[in-house]
Image (tube, rainbow, N blue to C red):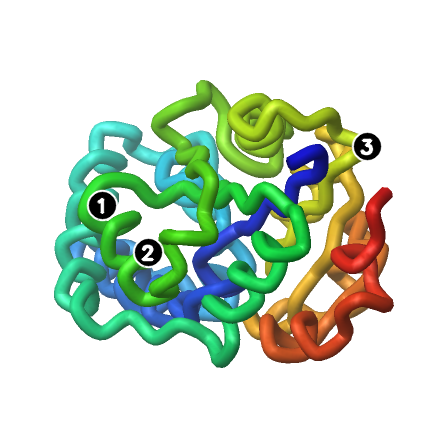
Amino acid sequence: MDRTAVFDVDGTLVDTNHLHVTTWWEAFRQAGHRVPMHAIHRSVGLGSTDLIAHLLGDDRDEDQDARISVAHTTLYAQYFDRLPAFADAGRLLRRLHQDGWAVVLATSASGPELSALRRAIDADDAIAATASADDVEEGKPAPELVEHALELAGVPAERAVFVGDTVWDMQAGSRAGVRCVGVLCGGIPRDDLERAGAQAVYDDPAHLLSSLPAGPLGQSG
């Protein structure tokens, strides 16, 4: 395969963003912080440390970071056996695989969380590799995660498309030199995604699938 479709997972293939918002809100509350849910929503997609820093600021008590992160992980884990994939998420990945794309996931999730997300998508036969935040020093919006995904696939940036739902995804993909496609199912407005670098925007995986082969993922690049 000489072209790669790189996918974010949370909010792009699996409907988890608002679960993350709720569990992060509770984790912050338990640590004595009142953080508005709308602010948390706009921060979903960052790695845990970056998300905490983004929301609490550089003058926070960093000794709390690990406890807040663990609390979020523990709260979110209660949903692992019922994470809902978006309609046609698995079909989209299989169609791309059949069309000659190497499908690679690029996500901040790892361990049991990543396993739960892959079970929800139910398309392991179409997934060539997974790049996680454990593999890089800097998470999104730095380009490292997308660049690592390209290395795993052995495909250059000009032969790749990155699909995500947040401005952090679009910024990471743009910095890595790949074409970026946004989806609205994560709850971020179209204008924000386009300003961050999205060259095309679709409602969700089902809309993206139904738009093949006219869109970026139907083109050979």
**What residue is rendered at 76% in x and 74% in y?**
211
**Label 2 element class:** helix
Along the polypeptide, which appears first: circle 2 or circle 1? 1
Q: Position of residue 114 (x, y in %)?
A: 29, 48
Residue on which disc 2 sits:
118
Callout 2: few (<14), some (14-19), or many (20+) C-alpha neighbours within 10 Å? many
> What amino acid does circle 1 point to?
Ile
Along the polypeptide, which appears first: circle 2 or circle 3? 2
Asked if 14 appears above or below 6 in the picture, the reply is: below
Residue on which disc 1 sits:
68
> What amino acid does circle 3 point to?
Glu
Please state which of the two labelled residues, at mark 1 or mark 3, is closer to the viewer: 3
**What residue is rendered at 42% in x and 40% in y?**
47
Query: Quarter-wise, where is residue 143 in the image?
Result: top right
Query: Quarter-wise, where is residue 165 in the image?
Result: bottom right
> What amino acid does circle 2 point to?
Arg
Mark 2 to mark 3 CA distance (whole Å): 27 Å
**Label 3 element class:** helix
Rendered-image quadrant of the N terminus = top right
Circle number at residue 158: 3
Q: Position of residue 110 (x, y in %)?
A: 29, 40
Q: Is residue 174 left or right of residue 65?
A: right
**Label 1 element class:** helix
Rendered-image quadrant of the C terminus = top right
Mark 1 to mark 3 CA distance (whole Å): 39 Å
Q: Is residue 102 left or right of residue 170?
A: left
Q: Pick the residue in front: 4 or 24.
A: 4
Q: Is residue 28 left or right of residue 172?
A: left
